[in-house]
Image (cartoon, rainbow, N blue to C red):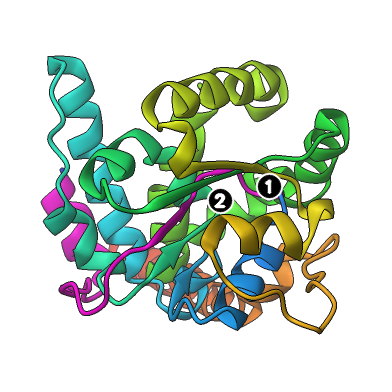
Amino acid sequence: MEFVKEAVYALQPPCRIRTVPLRVLAVGPSRSGTASLQAALLQLGYQHTYHGFDPTLHPEDDIVWHRLRLKQECGRRTGQHCLTATDFDQVIGHCAAITDHAAAAFAPELITAYPEAKVILNIRKDINAWHNSVMKTLVPLQTSWTFWFRSWFCSELFWLQEGFFRGNWQTFYRGSFEKHSRRVLEDHCHLVRSLVPPDRLLEWDVTDGWEPLCEFLKQPVPRTPFPTLNKDLPYEQMFQDRIARADANIKSFVLVIFLSGLFLWFVIY
């Protein structure tokens, strides 16, 4: 089945290798200041810092994250750590840091694969505000039937759905963000704390700003204000070109069906 998916919705997945040391794992969930944290890490010299927006520019990355999730699920069923640094390097080999959903979804495996990396557990102090933010931004796209339907007519949208929304997102939130997110976050925080020694772990809220972050990373504090990004971003606007391509393919598909039906009608009658 996976072969069929990759054949029908063909994109060329990356095959990167490690070119810089991976120094920071920011394993908090999406909408926990991840874009601001990415900007801050980039400013501090962590080139490149991977974020959930990266697959928007490189949609083929979603295929690799999908493959990694399948391997992760196999490993968890057998009680083994199947994912290695080599596996992750295929998609983040060029990165000195990673943040956003992929870092959270693969946190245990990333922490094991990169034992020298420092770990930031970036979570918002106001859990209800975090929950509401996700419900307002990401969940409408995830639950949109029109976005789902279009994904069958555009390879990039298909892998966004398969690799992210139907895949890593649904798995991480146990099938429903709305129902399970608070418990998932609580369990996730406990797990990270159990895996990382205190000297390698920083628990951080985006409102904490530069000082604790720079102290933890042993970096000088910039004189510029801490970046504030991605407030209530309308996510669907990020995919307008792919939505337009899907709509064009849908029109072509409907036209082919119509003309085929018309031809059969003339042949039969």
Question: Does 240 sit above or below residue 148?
Answer: below
- Tell me: residue 106, above or below residue 78: below
What residue would you read off at disc 2? Answer: 148
Image location (x, y in percent) of residue 110: 31, 45
| Residue that appears at 47% across and 76% down | 46
Q: Give the x, y percent position of residue 5.
A: 23, 54
Residue nearest the observer in this picture, 131 or 9 = 131
- Give the residue displayed 12% in from the left and 35% down from the top: 82
Q: In this orientation, which residue lies closer to the viewer: 127 or 213?
A: 213
User: Is 8 part of what is drawn in magenta?
Assistant: yes
Instruction: Judge whether residue 33 is colored magenta.
Output: no
Image location (x, y in percent) of residue 202: 58, 43
Work out which quarter of the rendered image holds the C terminus and state it: bottom left
Q: Is residue 29 above or below residue 269?
A: above
Q: Amino acid at mark 1?
A: Ser
Residue underneath mark 1: 144
Q: How many residues crowd around disc 1 within 10 Å: few (fewer than 14), some, or many (20 or more)?
A: few
Task: Answer left or right for 203 relative to 1.
Answer: right
Q: Is residue 104 left or right of residue 207?
A: left
> Would you say the residues marked 1 and 2 are in contact, meaning their CB atoms lie under 8 Å apart?
yes
Q: Secondary structure at mark 2?
A: helix
Q: Say whether residue 189 is visible.
A: yes
Q: Which residues are magenta?
A: 2-31
Q: Residues within 10 Å of mark 2 (few under 14, many from 20)?
A: some
